[in-house]
Image (cartoon, helix red, strand yellow):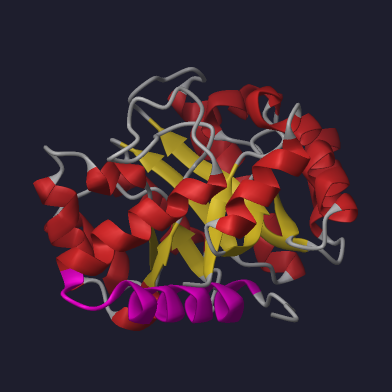
Amino acid sequence: MKLIDTHCHLAHGRLRQDTPDVLARAAEAGVISCICAAGTVAETKAALSLAGQYDTVWFTAGVHPHDATSVNDDALRQIGQLAGRDRCAAVGEIGLDYHYDFSPREAQRQAFAAQLALARDIAKPIVIHTREALEDTLAILAEADVGDLPVVFHSFTGGADGARRVLDIGATIGFSGIATFNRADDIRQAVALTPADRIMVETDAPYLSPEPVRKMKTNEPANVAHVAMRLAQVRNISPDAFAEQTTANARRLFGLDLSV
């Protein structure tokens, strides 16, 4: 299998302290590239640094809804500059999180809209985080009028109905280790109905270790292989065929120029 972990936080302290070994284990598991996601300006800068050090690493630029109150003119200026770098795959992860509400909802909505406008202006793909906020997420996305820019709903946790709504707007869905959990039948229903050209896999490392390594405290990109194998089973195709599909999708959507 040749896989791309389309969303992992390599700049997180639990992974960055051991980056060479983390990436070596990923390569052994068949991971040919990782997209290092960011949730703050500082994390975006750290992700850029990692992408500059390792030719298998790309990065995203953006501010997570948890930190929406930090999104001001200066933050947007910096995100715009960082997103313009060659190895930036997308603007993200941006969106809404009404589960934790670490930032006021209005601040989340404003930060999301502002970063969607930024992505539209520089023509970058968009990586969305949404939790218990799908209605508002879709409404703000529609109002932003991002045209035919690629949009990814990462670590999707909705069921079949939510997946259909996301797919109806032309978005791609990324599934993480949550889809492997024993009680995640609703998410696996979404896995089953997602078209082959609009599905991707991720770890969201260092979070969300998948079965059968769910007890692993620090998730790693190597574990995207477990996600892929479980999702291939759900879709009744071989792991190799599923890996080929999802890797092709990631390459096309993010415009990854890979030599492997």
Q: Position of residue 186 (x, y in %)?
A: 11, 49
Residue at position x 35%, y 61% in the image: 228
Q: Nearer the viewer, residue 243 or 81?
A: 243
What secondary structure do most residues of the magenta stretch adopt?
A: helix
The quadrant where residue 67 appears: top right
The residue segment tinted magenta is: 235-254
Residue 245 lies in magenta, yes or no?
A: yes
Residue at position x 87%, y 44% in the image: 49
Residue 120 appears in view: yes
Residue 168 lies in magenta, yes or no?
A: no
Q: Is residue 174 above or below residue 12?
A: below
Q: In the image, is 25 to the left or to the right of 180?
A: right
Task: State the quadrant of the C terminus.
Answer: bottom right
Q: In the image, is 19 to the left or to the right of 229?
A: right
Q: In the image, is 35 to the left or to the right of 231?
A: right
Residue at position x 69%, y 75% in the image: 256
Q: Nearer the viewer, residue 136 or 172?
A: 172
Residue at position x 39%, y 48% in the image: 155
Residue 72 appears in view: no
Q: Position of residue 39 (x, y in %)?
A: 64, 36
* Number of numbered discs: 0
Task: Kindly give the residue lying farthest to the front in the view shown.
Answer: 28
Q: Position of residue 160 (x, y in %)?
A: 14, 59
